[in-house]
Amino acid sequence: MSYQTLLDYSNRMLASVRNEDWDTLIQAEVDYVREVERISHGESGVALDEEQQLQKLQLLSTIMDQDREIRERLIARRTLLEQTLLSAQKKQKLEHSYRN
């Protein structure tokens, strides 16, 4: 169930990044990290049968695919913000040049 919970947080993160809802994304990431920590402490010594291992693998595969899309969208957002900042800096320099 813990990996299903991770997938739920991953789904929230993906939806948030797709909707450019940065506050919700941050909260979902915090929840996700907490769940990862909880799993890492509780998973040792737990034996999974073959079906459970397959289910875990499928969940992790989906989570990794979503993580890849989240990272790609965040990189694109960062690039856009960098371009906007650069444009604003150029505009300021140009305005400063005209004033002097």
Image: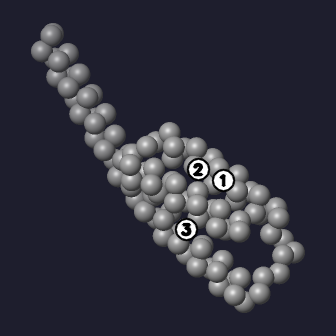
Residue to which mark 2 is pinned: 29
The residue to which callout 1 is attached is 33
For disc 3, the marked residue is 63
| SS of the residue under disc 2 | helix
| Quarter of the rendering containing residue 71 | bottom left
Label 1 vs label 3: CA separation? 13 Å
Q: Residue at x 45, y 55 (%)?
A: 15
Which quarter of the rendered picture does the C terminus lie within?
A: top left
Q: Are marks 2 and 1 in contact (CB under 8 Å)?
A: yes
Q: Amino acid at mark 3?
A: Ile
Task: Name the outermost residue toward the bottom.
Answer: 50
Q: Secondary structure at mark 1?
A: helix
* Residue at position x 78%, y 82% in the image: 48
Tag 3 and tag 2, C-beta contact below 8 Å = no
Above or below 82: residue 69 = below
Amino acid type, mark 1: Val
For mark 2, does the 10 Å Cα neighbourhood hold few (<14), some (14 to 19), or many (20 or more) residues?
A: some
The residue located at (20%, 16%) in the rendering is 96
Residue 35 image offset from top left, x and y in percent: 70, 56
Which disc number belongs to residue 81?
A: none
Measured as percent of width and height from the top left, residue 62 is found at 53, 72
